[in-house]
Amino acid sequence: MSARRRDNAVILAVDQGTTGTTVLLVDHAGGVVGRGYREIVCRYPYPGWVEQDAEEVWQRTLEAIADACRSAPGSEITAIGITNQRETTVLWDVETSLPVAPAIVWQCRRTAPLCEDLRTRGLGPEVTRRTGLVIDPYFSATKVRWLLDADSSLLPRAREGQIRFGTIDSWLIWKLSGGTAHRTDYSNASRTMLYNIHERRWDQLLLEAFGIPEAILPEVCPSSFHFAATSRISLPGGVGLPAGIPICGVAGDQQAALFGQACFEPGMVKCTYGTGAFLLMNTGTTAVQSRSGLLTTLACGPNGQPSYALEGSVFVAGAAIQWLRDELGIIRSAGESEVLARSVPDNRGVYLVPAFTGLGAPYWDAEARGALLGLTRGIGKAHLARAALESIAYQTRDVVDAMASDAGRAASELRIDGGAAANDFLAQFQADILGTTVIRPKQTETTALGAAYLAGLAVGVWSTTAEIASLWQFDRRFEPTITDDLRDTLYRGWQRAVARVRSIDRASIP
């Protein structure tokens, strides 16, 4: 009997994120029937450094899988999909399957001097041409180089094939398969700064430039593909994961969310509101070279085969609301921001530019710092809450406009997900400031859902992406409600605020 006809058949989707691991059990109708979650610790040993224990990531993932299985007794797992925090870098020993150093998280900035050296050597244009990325500590290549330099014993072992490198997806595949499979997918490979996205191969020129042995790299496969099968694994609490379950859906978190939002046609755009905000536009078979400060990346196309996307990253989105709560004490919960924002009719000219860690796309200004502009004596906490929520929408428009310029086509709608997508004020203001329909799906955990869809395609739970698109349902559509003149006035105010922040003489600030 096929997997699609068994009522108890489910896909196990692992969403391994920066702060925790979510596991969903997804049925053939795209419904979530089981769930587990475990937090993961980030460590900050020095300013700008962010690390995790890869073995802890593995153990917490097992615990979340066990939680999900216990929440849906009797379910039969027919396949496993994995989506993951991208760029986070793990090196491990082939014989012991243990990490040889802490994992360097995507947020870590320790390799900034190495990146500056590479730019000075004139490698920037070549890196962008081959990988679609910019030279930045964000990506995996300089993290790998740093780890190999930090321990003199590692490079010789890497050359001999005794060490493996992987992003978190590769690490989990290795552990789930009992060390029999060292693989990744196109979308994760495209975030390493070592992968040629046009020729779809590890790039020899870049491997030589970074001094990274090819022997440590995983095999690159389509996102919907039989990567491996599980070994017999004992889970916490007496639950067991049987041997032989196919691991057959893998994608980086943002590409998985694009797939989970059923953005299968060129021109479709999704935005995931999290700590930051991440926008991807499907560009189909065309790798659009950005002229507007965006990245070109590989994504999951029809039936899980590789396609291309434009990507823009906003560094601070939900983190601006956390700032109101944790540092200013204006709110006690994120939900209160909506109540406060609605209590005033407008922002009264107040703009928050939340450049707490610089500005991301399309500015890429690492030295910019946050500012609150337009304050008068009558400004209260409600205006600050409104300005913080509006800042998320303004930054999103910055990226959407850049995508339209690069792709030569405007987005007809924006599909949103992530925690802040539940905020009706934000969703409505996003539609107003874009002048475009904003759509929130019924299932906002689209990252894990995308991994489930990719796995299900590989084992025949779903036959085509068209069938998956028929499962996607919206919760609410938000249409623009303000005039074009007001929209332009508000956005010009934002642009002036950003220009003010970027014009500050930073040399005069101690």
Image (tube, rainbow, N blue to C red):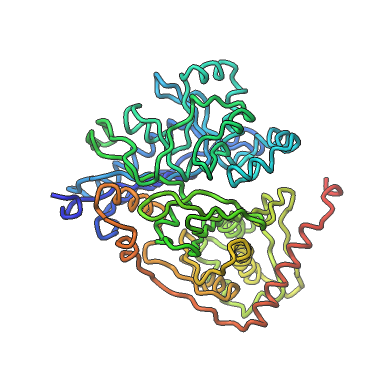
One can see residue 272 in this view: no
Quadrant placement of the C terminus: top right
130 to the left or right of 500: left
Q: Is residue 88 above or below residue 358?
A: above
Residue 425 is left or right of residue 302, and the answer is: right
Depth check, front residue: 136 or 36: 136
- Horizontally, is 148 left or right of 489 in the view? left
Residue 480 shows in this picture: yes
> Seen in the image, is 149 located left or right of residue 195?
right
Please count the marks in the image.
0
Residue at image coords 46%, 43%: 186
> Residue 486 appears at what percent x and percent y?
66, 81
In the rendered image, residue 439, in percent from the top left (x then y), is placed at 45, 70
Q: Nearer the viewer, residue 146 or 37?
A: 146
Q: Please state which of residues 441 and 316 is positioned toward the viewer in this rendering.
A: 441
Residue at horizontal 45 percent and vertical 57 percent from the top: 258
User: Where, by quadrant of the figure, is residue 496 drawn?
Assistant: bottom right
The residue that appears at 43% across and 51% down in the rendered structure is 300
Q: Is residue 390 above or below residue 489?
A: above
Displayed quadrant of residue 370? bottom right
> Please, is residue 160 above or below residue 86 in the view?
above
Residue visible at 43% across and 30% down in the picture = 55
Picture quarter containing residue 114?
top right
Q: Residue furthest right?
A: 508
